[in-house]
Amino acid sequence: MTLLRSQWRSLVVAQLVAADTLAGSRVFAARDWPTDPAVLFPIILVQVPHERKESLGRQAPEFNTVVDLVVVGRIETGNVNDAETAIETLCEQIELAILANPAIVSAQPFQQFTYVETNTGFNSEGKRHIGEVAMTFGCELYQWYNPPLITQLSTITTTIEPFGTLGQTLEIQNIFS
């Protein structure tokens, strides 16, 4: 069984690539991040570092699961004004690719975005200016676990003891065949 958060992350990565953002095809899932400086910028990194399940009751194992989908976009430019403009553009492209994408918002078991948190930052310590946006999307998903398959019931044995008798045994076999 593939984890729901893994399926969700893969869907978002595919949709960000298809959205043709400033990062183009440089969209990577967790543990698949390039280290070659030639392909680092612009780039989008997607991970799901946290999820929380809220039970829907005491009966079946079903949950409203909120998955924290973290999307980090990075760019590199020659000056801080260009970096800020590029980060704002990339941020808007990421938002549209996720929040307004029918493939995402209509995907089962998606229910709603519970929040979106956006943080931007810039570093201009070297010759180049690096900008970063980190967006966390709270994605509420319905999750239900099928109970494990148990051995099929094939025989029932019971003892019937009416008043004043010594007890009779009744056996029923192959009741489900």
Image: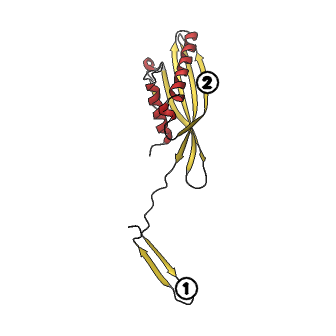
Q: Nearer the viewer, mark 2 or mark 1?
A: 1
Other-residue count near label 1 (Cα within 10 Å), few / some / many at <14 / 14–19 / ≥20? few
Hey, which residue is sitting farthest bottom in the picture? 164
Q: Is 84 rendered above or below residue 160?
A: above
What residue type is disc 1 on?
Answer: Pro
Q: What numbered label is drawn on residue 52?
A: none
Q: Is 112 rendered above or below residue 96?
A: below
Q: CA distance from mark 2 to mark 1?
A: 76 Å
Q: Residue 170 location, x and y as percent? A: 46, 80
Q: Residue 119 location, x and y as percent? A: 61, 24
Residue carrying label 2 = 119
Q: Residue 88 location, x and y as percent? A: 57, 17
In the image, what residue occupies the spot 55% across and 11% down? Answer: 82
Secondary structure beneath label 1 = loop
In the image, what residue occupies the spot 43% across and 72% down? Answer: 155
Q: Is residue 60 visible?
A: yes
Q: Residue 132 appears in which quarter of the rendering?
A: top right
Secondary structure beneath label 2 = strand
* Quadrant placement of the C terminus: bottom left
Q: Is 112 rendered above or below residue 166?
A: above
Q: Residue 134 appears in which quarter of the rendering?
A: top right
Q: Is residue 30 visible?
A: no
Other-residue count near label 2 (Cα within 10 Å), few / some / many at <14 / 14–19 / ≥20? few
Q: Residue 125 location, x and y as percent? A: 58, 13
What residue type is disc 2 on?
Answer: Asn
Frontmost residue, 18 versus 87:
18
Residue carrying label 1 = 162
Label 2 or label 1, whichever comes before in sequence order? 2
Frontmost residue, 100 versus 12:
100
